[in-house]
Image: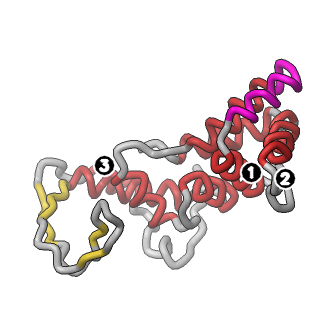
Amino acid sequence: MTDIQADEHTEDLTGFEDQIDDVDDTEELEYDDRSIDVVDAGGSASSGSRRRRQITRQGASKAIGKFVELSAAPREHLAILATAMGGKPDPAELAATIVSSPRVNLTSVNDLLAVADAAAESPYAGMLKSMELAREQLRNVWSLMQAADLVSGSFPSKESAGAIAVAEAAAKVSAPERDLLDAVRALARK
């Protein structure tokens, strides 16, 4: 069993893990989110929304379970997951995002592994795969590699130089780095 490190989110969770499965999943809870800022599709925030959402005990149990799992994860894994998801390495924030999202987007992890797989075949294949990525995708992969300590420094200013740098770094991804990325992917599962 993994040791849970106490911090501001976990200090009161001792012994809580066993209670998660004992929750009555059929009872529904309601809350009114009037005090929550709601962002509409246009990007503007409005408060005072009168929408009502229903939270089942099962949903609450999943969120708490994910929080406990993320709280026990190594900080390095949380940092990489947060970078891949575009958030902060906070277990509560990551758990809320993972549980409430229909699908967790780990495109940068998938892009990095695709370039690494191609580079394993040949350096040219890795470079071609890297050059297929848009500039923003390359930047996201670079940020992910920085979080995983695979590269240091800033992303090259020219797109072609960035694609080459990503391909060269991805070619050096070995089994331990792949295991690390697989562990991060596992944390992102609901």
Residue at the spot 55% in from the left edge and 41% down from the top edge:
186
Mark 2 sits on what residue? 151
Q: Give left or right: position of 15 versus 74.
A: left
- Spatial CA span between label 3 and label 2: 41 Å
Q: Residue 142 shows which numbered tag?
A: 1
- Residues marked 1 and 2 touching at CB (< 8 Å): yes
Q: Secondary structure at mark 1?
A: helix
Q: Which residues are magenta?
A: 119-132
Mark 3 sits on what residue? 21
Q: Report the magenta stretch's main SS.
A: helix
Q: In the image, residue 170 lies at what x, y percent?
A: 81, 38
Q: Residues within 10 Å of mark 2 (few under 14, many from 20)?
A: some
Decide which of 31, 129 is in the foreground and name it.
129
Look at label 2 and name its amino acid. Answer: Val
Q: Give left or right: position of 29 versus 80.
A: left
Q: Quadrant of the C terminus?
A: top left
Q: Is residue 103 above or below residue 30?
A: above
Q: In the image, residue 27 lies at what x, y percent?
A: 11, 54
Q: Residues within 10 Å of mark 1 (few under 14, many from 20)?
A: many
Look at label 3 and name its amino acid. Answer: Asp
Decide which of 101, 68 is in the foreground and name it.
101
Decide which of 59, 143 is in the foreground and name it.
143
Q: Secondary structure at mark 3?
A: helix
Magenta stretch contains residue 126: yes
Q: Residue 1 shows which numbered tag?
A: none
Decide which of 172, 44 is in the foreground and name it.
44
Residue at the spot 71% in from the left edge and 55% down from the top edge:
143
**What's the coloring here?**
secondary structure
